[in-house]
Amino acid sequence: MPLIDLRSDTVTKPTPAMRRAMFEAEVGDDVYQEDPTVNRLEARAAEVLGKEAALFVPSGCMGNTIGIKLLTRHGEEVIAEARGHLLNYELSMAAWFSGCLVRPVAAPDGILTWDLIAPQVRPRGPHWAATGCIELENTHNMAGGTVYPQDVFDDVCDRAHAHGLPVHLDGARLFNAAAALGRPVSELCAKADTVMVCLSKGLGAPVGSMLAGPAALMDDARLYRKRLGGGMRQAGILAAAGLIALEQMPARMAEDHANARFLAEGLGALPGVRVLNPEPATNIVVFEAPEPARLSADLKARGVLINPISETALRAVTHYDVTREDCAQALAAVQEVVTPCRSH
Ligand SMILES: *Cc1c(COP(=O)(O)O)cnc(C)c1O
């Protein structure tokens, strides 16, 4: 049975253009910085993100881990949004690798403002750990792919910098945010000190993320990557797909966003279903329905994969491997399982 996979945009498979580029990729040993394709990807990512340098890392988790390490000292705190990926889905790497405590700040829609952050900023003192950096997530995954209004993002960065605090941006889906705002990614992350973007989500590459920032920091980042086991050799095979992801895939993201809106609208019309972000800004729909775990299992039996994210809610993510027709089929399946015929 063909599956309609709405669990995440990580499930996207490499496009035919990516597979061709991978097959033909010129490679070398990247630990010696001699892989021409990785070097091209890193130069191009730095350009696209508007930073001095960029580093190809195997995962978003590693990119965030290194970003936090670069901006903090052991024993400091990192302020992050309470539902953020850094705090909840990265195996406490901020603690494990950087020795930092994540200080969560809850924000409606996952969008942190300086007013929310300010009361949690701690100076050096005899009893508490000083704040080392601020971490922002754009788009915010668990809040439903919400996008930072650019003035809010820039204001947080300016005020953080005025307090001597650097900012790391978890931009796993920054290209989705850019598509939603109709602005280049470089503008979105201009004021962040370091930024991580995933190539392996909506951009469709099989593996990899980019960490970008000042060249001196990226030199250190390369060493942390090696320590974490991310020193890859002929990684040009992967970077070749990453280059296609950067060049060809952002232009089609609006389609995913339109599909998410279509899903949200359809789900919202079903009895017993409540969409938490009825007008998704990007490619994520979060909705409440009775018994999410059972619902997810019943959907799977109908060839539709949607994961529960809590005791009450599920998350559907659109991407280039699901068409409008797939979304319509998924809606029909949800309708069947939320309103089951109890008589048999
Ligand atoms: C997916 C994701 C990451 C990184 O995930 P990896 O699976 O390690 O690549 C980081 N932040 C957010 C918000 C994400 O959604």
Image (cartoon, rainbow, N blue to C red):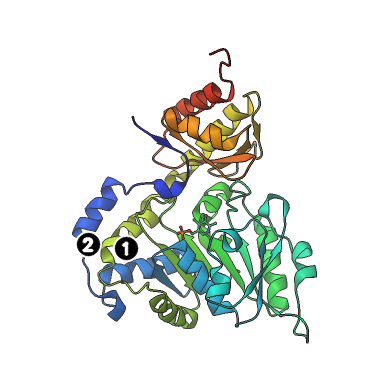
Q: In which quarter of the image is residue 112?
A: bottom right
Q: Is residue 317 above or below residue 230?
A: above
Q: What element carries label 2?
A: loop
Q: In which quarter of the image is the N terminus?
A: top left
Q: Nearer the viewer, residue 233 or 24?
A: 233
User: Which residue in the rendered view is the most extreme toward the bottom?
Assistant: 126
- Identify the amino acid type marked 2: Ala
Sequence-earlier tag: 1 or 2: 2
Residue 248: x %, y % from top left: 37, 51
Kindly check if marks 1 and 2 are in contact, taking CB atoms under 8 A apart as contact: yes
Q: Which residue is drawn at 50% across and 65% down?
A: 196
Q: Which of 175 and 143 is in front in this view?
A: 143
Please indicate, yes or no, whether residue 190 appears anywhere in the rendered image.
no
Q: Which residue is drawn at 34% across and 74% down?
A: 231
Residue of label 2: 25
Residue of label 1: 239
Q: Is residue 162 above or below residue 154?
A: below
Tell me if 53 is positioned left or right of 275 in this view: left
